């Protein structure tokens, strides 16, 4: 029972606020808590959360007195009554527990900016099943679709023919079939036929500069591409310029003695020495970031065998470090700055948005990633869209933590939730055999991650910037597709009937890559009218695949989608058809809207293209978060798990 006496108005500001509470004595010996107090006249209200006792905030009501004392009762806790007094900047007092126990307590004021939870934030990550398309353990392509593509002229030869046309329009020499392969990749890096490649890029960049509409845009352009009056068209130009700030007069040849000592200088190359040296230095730069110990083993002989040349190597590698940051700034400029004359002056981002009139298409971050060769990868930031289906917020502390750190912060924590105990790699549940994994493991396994928080296009900075436009377009469309697949009505995710299992069905790789190639190609064909060089990079990439890797999903998928576009010429309708059935290529051509275009399905021989990956099971995990790290409390396998219809067991 509370005794109501007069109160001291000065207590209002001194008592109100947030407090960190420590209770001592008894079992356990110490209890931490969080106290929120509000004072209105003589009335005290608020909440108290005691770790391991209240399992969340409990309401309190009480009174303030004129002798600096406070007293309150707590609802729903065995710590029912608190008495205390103000002692300078602290509150001290006594807590009365059911059964007659008493404990001493002290509270220190907490600023709102201080992160503290009496009860650790607790989340549950639902069980996730990942299926790689549908069908049996061998992936097949519909023979009727392949035959229709060939009959309509969508062939590897047609891709190579178009590449030759684009090379001529760009003022470049087309590589022969025999040279397509590694030569195409090296040329995309600006390290084959460099003189012609650089000249072509300078011409196009000069045209882009003339199209910029403001003085500020031209100043940014000059800062990036002509900072000293000389052109910087790629990272090799930038790296050499940066190295000359350390060692005036340095040339690529300055690094050759050190590279030769380490056995890193090929002897039988027919290309100019500078191209060969720059390529080896870039590979060495990638090695320094990816495998520091291996890098040290390679460079140690250089220090003693050719010390002066080794200093040149070091300066050029530092130059590449600077060039990576330059590259990211350049790609942001080319993507977001208006320089395209298409119904006015528009940016590449505007062009992409216009290709998706029914959807919002945010600009992804374009980030340099050292693959070691001209390559890109998409990271679809779909975590926010699946959060409510994937994560259960188990207590008020978790809700507060999520409000403070956001979805990206939670995604970082989930990344660290490890798999079950070592040795548990495969489990049989119901009809299916699953590979056991975690979200973090799946994220690390795939170049584009898994259920990530942010949209990012990863691209190797050795890709010449104008060629990288095609790469960005391709990966950007993957990202858009990824978002559409995770919508509640999309084909990629479903929550089981009991709401406890999230099923992720990855798209058929040939459909996904083919659609992204086709979407990017539609835009590149428009750009090629004025800037054929920009489309040349993707054209040479596809030609290399057509000549050397005809079953690669990019080229084979592109030919399939191009054939489908003959039946469905409207881009939006084509996208809807493919994405509605993007887990199964056979279902696409069986759709009533296009079935007539792919007759005699049974008579055409289907093409086996390799095994599918075994389905993955990510078990349900309940975890708390402390100092940004997850601590798993319980791991559960839900039996039998939900699975998409049409999926058969994948043999071990």
Image (cartoon, helix red, strand yellow):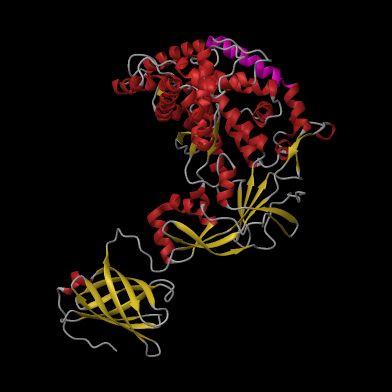
Residue 593 x %, y %? 69, 35
Residue at the (50%, 18%) spot, across then down: 257
Please tell me whether residue 617 is drawn above or below residue 177 in the rendered image. Answer: below
Task: Return the residue nearer the eye: 578 or 142.
Answer: 142
In the rendered structure, the answer to whether residue 114 lies left or right of residue 518 reads left
Please tell me whether residue 555 is drawn above or below residue 500 in the rendered image. Answer: above
Residue at the (59%, 47%) spot, across then down: 442
Give the magenta-colored segment's residue range: 152-171
Residue at the (15%, 78%) spot, across then down: 8
Task: Return the residue nearer the eye: 280 or 535.
Answer: 280
- Considering every residue shown, the one lying at the far right of the view is 603
Please tell me whether residue 330 is drawn above or below residue 106 in the rendered image. Answer: above
Image-quadrant location for residue 114: bottom left
For residue 527, say whether it is visible: no
Task: Return the residue nearer the eye: 243 or 608.
Answer: 243
Residue 268 x %, y %? 62, 14
In the rendered structure, the answer to whether residue 471 lies left or right of residue 586 reads left
Within the magenta stretch, is there residue 97?
A: no
Majority secondary structure of the magenta segment?
helix
Specify the quadrant that holds the N terminus. Answer: bottom left
Residue 252 x %, y %? 46, 16
For residue 183, say whether it is visible: yes
Within the magenta stretch, is there residue 167?
A: yes
Image-quadrant location for residue 184: top right
In the rendered structure, the answer to whether residue 307 lies left or right of residue 138 reads left
Residue 388 x %, y %? 51, 56
Task: Return the residue nearer the eye: 457 or 519.
Answer: 457
């Amino acid at each position: 029972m509370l005794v109501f006496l007069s109160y001291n108005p000065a207590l209002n500001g001194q008592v109100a606020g947030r407090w960190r509470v420590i209770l001592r004595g008894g079992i356990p010996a110490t209890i931490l808590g969080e106290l929120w107090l509000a004072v209105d006249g003589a009335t005290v209200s608020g909440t108290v959360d005691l770790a391991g006792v209240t399992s969340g905030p409990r309401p309190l009501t009480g009174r303030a007195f004129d002798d600096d004392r406070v007293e309150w009762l707590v609802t729903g806790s065995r710590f029912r009554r608190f008495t205390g007094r103000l002692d300078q900047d602290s509150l001290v007092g006594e807590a009365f527990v059911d059964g007659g126990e008493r404990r001493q307590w002290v509270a220190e004021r907490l600023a709102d900016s201080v992160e503290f939870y009496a009860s650790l934030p607790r989340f549950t990550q639902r069980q996730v099943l990942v299926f790689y398309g549908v069908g049996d353990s061998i992936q097949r392509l519909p023979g009727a679709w392949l035959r229709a593509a060939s009959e309509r002229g969508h062939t590897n030869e047609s891709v190579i023919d178009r590449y030759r046309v684009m090379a001529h329009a760009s003022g470049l020499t087309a590589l022969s079939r025999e040279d397509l392969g590694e030569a195409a990749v090296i040329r995309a890096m600006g390290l084959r036929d460099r003189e012609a490649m650089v000249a072509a890029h300078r011409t196009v960049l000069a045209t882009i500069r003339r199209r910029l509409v403001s003085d500020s845009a031209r100043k940014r352009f000059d800062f990036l591409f002509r900072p000293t009056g000389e052109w910087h068209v790629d990272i090799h130009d930038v790296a050499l310029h940066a190295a000359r700030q350390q060692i005036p007069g340095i040339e690529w040849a300055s690094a050759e003695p050190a590279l030769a000592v380490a056995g890193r200088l090929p002897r039988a190359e027919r290309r100019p020495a500078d191209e060969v040296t720059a390529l080896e230095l870039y590979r060495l730069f990638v090695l320094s970031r990816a495998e520091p110990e291996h890098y040290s083993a390679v460079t140690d002989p250089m220090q003693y065998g050719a010390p002066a040349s080794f200093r040149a190597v070091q300066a050029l590698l530092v130059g590449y470090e600077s060039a990576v940051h330059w590259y990211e700034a350049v790609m942001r400029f080319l993507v977001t700055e208006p320089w395209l004359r298409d119904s006015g002056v528009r940016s590449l981002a505007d062009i992409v948005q216009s290709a998706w009139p029914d959807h919002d298409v945010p600009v992804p971050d374009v980030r340099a990633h050292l693959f070691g060769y001209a390559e890109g990868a998409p990271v679809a930031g779909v975590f926010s869209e699946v959060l409510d289906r994937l994560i259960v917020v188990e207590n008020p502390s978790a809700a507060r933590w999520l409000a403070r750190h956001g979805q990206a912060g939670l995604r970082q924590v989930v990344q660290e939730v490890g798999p079950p105990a070592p040795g548990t790699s495969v489990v049989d549940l119901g009809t299916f055999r699953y590979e056991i994994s975690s979200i973090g493991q799946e994220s690390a396994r795939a170049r584009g991650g898994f259920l990530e928080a942010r949209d990012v296009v990863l691209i190797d900075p050795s890709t010449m910037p104008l060629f990288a436009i095609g790469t960005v377009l391709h990966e950007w469309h993957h990202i858009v597709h990824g978002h559409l697949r995770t919508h509640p009505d999309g084909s990629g995710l479903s929550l089981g009937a009991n709401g406890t299992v999230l099923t992720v069905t990855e798209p058929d790789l040939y459909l996904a890559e083919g659609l992204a190639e086709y979407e990017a190609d539609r835009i590149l064909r428009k750009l090629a009218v004025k800037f054929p060089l920009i489309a040349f990079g993707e054209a040479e990439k596809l030609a290399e695949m057509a000549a050397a890797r005809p079953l690669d999903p990019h080229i084979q998928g592109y030919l399939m989608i191009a054939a489908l576009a003959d039946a469905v010429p409207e881009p939006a309708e084509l996208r809807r058809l493919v994405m509605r059935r993007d887990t199964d290529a056979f279902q696409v051509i069986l759709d009533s809207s296009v079935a007539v275009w792919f007759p005699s399905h049974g008579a055409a021989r289907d093409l086996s293209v390799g095994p599918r990956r075994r389905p993955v099971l990510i078990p349900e995990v309940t975890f708390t978060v402390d100092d940004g790290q997850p601590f798993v409390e319980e791991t559960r396998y839900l039996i039998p798990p939900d699975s998409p219809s049409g999926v058969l067991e994948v043999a071990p």
